[in-house]
Amino acid sequence: MESNPLAEYRTRLLGQLLKSTEAFCAACRAARDPKKSANNDQWNIHQLAQHVRDVNAQSYVPRIRRTLAEDYPAFVKFDADAWAAGHYNADEPLEKILGELEKNVRDVVAELKAQPDSAWSRLGHHDIHGDRTLQIWVERSLEHIREHLETVKAGVKEG
């Protein structure tokens, strides 16, 4: 059986998405004071956790699922700052936030593992970024988690 480098890349991508999510959640859980600023960031670790969960749930996962389900879906810009301003709940338990993020990522990874190779090239159109494949949305989701993982890790080291 011949090796398929693109399929292998996608398998690694999904593994990295799971591992990065686990690492992000572990870093948040390691914070002595999640309400303390994360590495002089404007948001604290609790806010960052809620932001990552919400952007994943409100932006990346719907784009992934719609790209799978629809022919050439159209996407508008998701304003994460406006969303946070209207939905942030300082009293929401950190563990609830992290549990929801972990579940959402595990569920979408399971869905993606069940897809044929051809699904990864399905297109949608973003009003700012133009045409994007399903694979690009998965890569962007991973990048977003990794970006905030680094911020949280730095904040935990300082705190």
Image (spheres, rainbow, N blue to C red):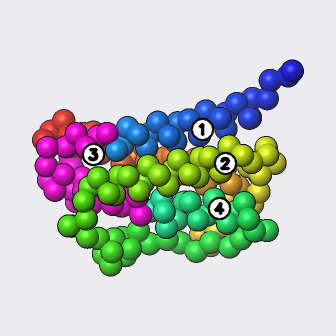
Q: Earlier in the sequence, mark 3 or mark 1?
A: 1
Q: Earlier in the sequence, mark 2 or mark 1?
A: 1
The residue that mark 2 highlights is: 112
Amino acid tagged 1: Leu
Residue drawn at point x = 38 percent, y = 52 percent: 99
Q: Quadrant of the N terminus?
A: top right
Q: Is residue 124 left or right of residue 49?
A: right
The residue that mark 1 highlights is: 13
x, y (%) of residue 132?
Answer: 68, 59
Q: Earlier in the sequence, mark 3 or mark 2?
A: 3
x, y (%) of residue 86?
Answer: 32, 78
Residue drawn at point x = 14 percent, y = 43 percent: 32
Q: Earlier in the sequence, mark 2 or mark 4?
A: 4
The residue that mark 3 highlights is: 28
Disc 2 vs disc 1: which is toward the camera? 2
Disc 4 vs disc 1: which is toward the camera? 4
Which residues lie in the magenta part? 26-54
Q: Earlier in the sequence, mark 3 or mark 4?
A: 3
x, y (%) of residue 11?
Answer: 65, 35
Amino acid tagged 3: Cys
Answer with the quarter of the image where residue 2 lies: top right
Q: CA distance from mark 2 to mark 4?
A: 9 Å
Under circle 3, the secondary element is helix
The residue that mark 4 highlights is: 65
Under circle 4, the secondary element is helix
Give whichever of 28, 81 is nearer the camera. 28
Q: CA distance from mark 3 to mark 2?
A: 26 Å
Under circle 2, the secondary element is helix
Is residue 34 in the magenta section? yes
Is residue 138 in the magenta section? no
Q: Earlier in the sequence, mark 4 or mark 1?
A: 1
Residue drawn at point x = 36 percent, y = 48 percent: 148
